[in-house]
Image (cartoon, helix red, strand yellow):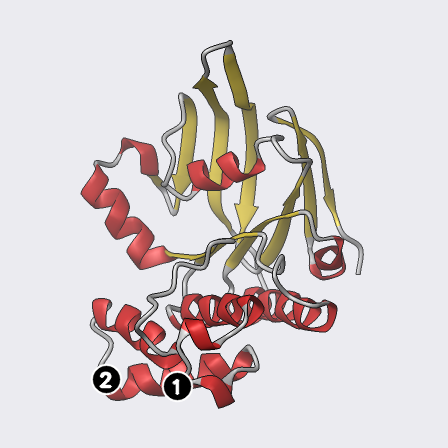
Amino acid sequence: MTKSAVIKVTGLSKHYQTLAKPIVAIDNITFTLYSHQMTLFKGPSGSGKSSVLSAISGLLKPDAGEVNGFGQDIWALNRPMRTRFRRKHCGFVFQKVGLFPALTAIEQIITMLALMNVPDKIARERALECLDLVGLSDRFDSKPGELSGGQNQRVAIARMLAKRPDLIFCDEPTSALDGKTGSNIAGLLRKVAKETGAMVFCVTHDDRLSAFADRIVEIEDGKIISDNMVEK
């Protein structure tokens, strides 16, 4: 297994203007993310970690700095090109799972794969496979209102995995899950990184994920205060 640099972040900064004063969310940070690696980005509320995730994935424009993904400065791309970059390379799991209320679990995934022009038969097979990976194969025909918050989170994770992304961005992916399920999902994300070569970047407060991480980066007041590989 040979890891390679897939995202290079240089001099990244972002601030928000409030009525009282500007708030520095990201303060001139530089780091590199690699394939085959699961990285945790940890820090207290308001430390800037979610802003970092949004900036490096092409969702939130920084005030300064460069985010280079697979050799492209993604913030030098126009909006349609950034959208294509995310569609081709990125998978997301957010705290707000963003499921369609009228669609069943399997339909949530098939609909997303249809946008990628995956043939119907293959899309259905892949959807069932990914629902099984997150322990929901028996709920494939359930709609969000028929599932718990944790189950809906797992549907969202299955939908992301079905896309087979190169870059996986997770914002508190285990926040709605019990201890056993949270550990299973963390293990699954690590397995995906190792077996597919994906880069997994998780913003989290959940210390359970630390045991599965290859690297833990801590941020405070918009600055990286530690960056350590995890010994296995």
Q: Which mark is residue 120?
A: 2
Q: Nearer the viewer, residue 38 or 91?
A: 91
Find residue 101 and report its horizontal and vertical position in percent: 34, 68
Hey, what amino acid is under mark 2?
A: Asp
Q: Mark 1 and 2 residues: CB-CB less than 8 Å, in contact?
A: no
User: At numbered mark 2, what does the secondary structure look like: helix, strand or loop?
Assistant: helix
**Residue depicted at 57% across the width and 82% down the height:** 135
Residue carrying label 1: 141
Find residue 169 and report its horizontal and vertical position in percent: 49, 52
Find residue 204 and report its horizontal and vertical position in percent: 64, 48
Furthest toward the top, the residue is 20
Q: Is residue 178 left or right of residue 25?
A: right
Image quadrant assignment for residue 133: bottom right
**Residue depicted at 42% across the width and 35% down the height:** 67
When the figure is inspected, residue 181 is found, relative to residue 205, above or below; the finding is below
Hey, what amino acid is under mark 1?
A: Asp
Q: Earlier in the sequence, mark 1 or mark 2?
A: 2
**Residue depicted at 25% across the width and 36% down the height:** 77
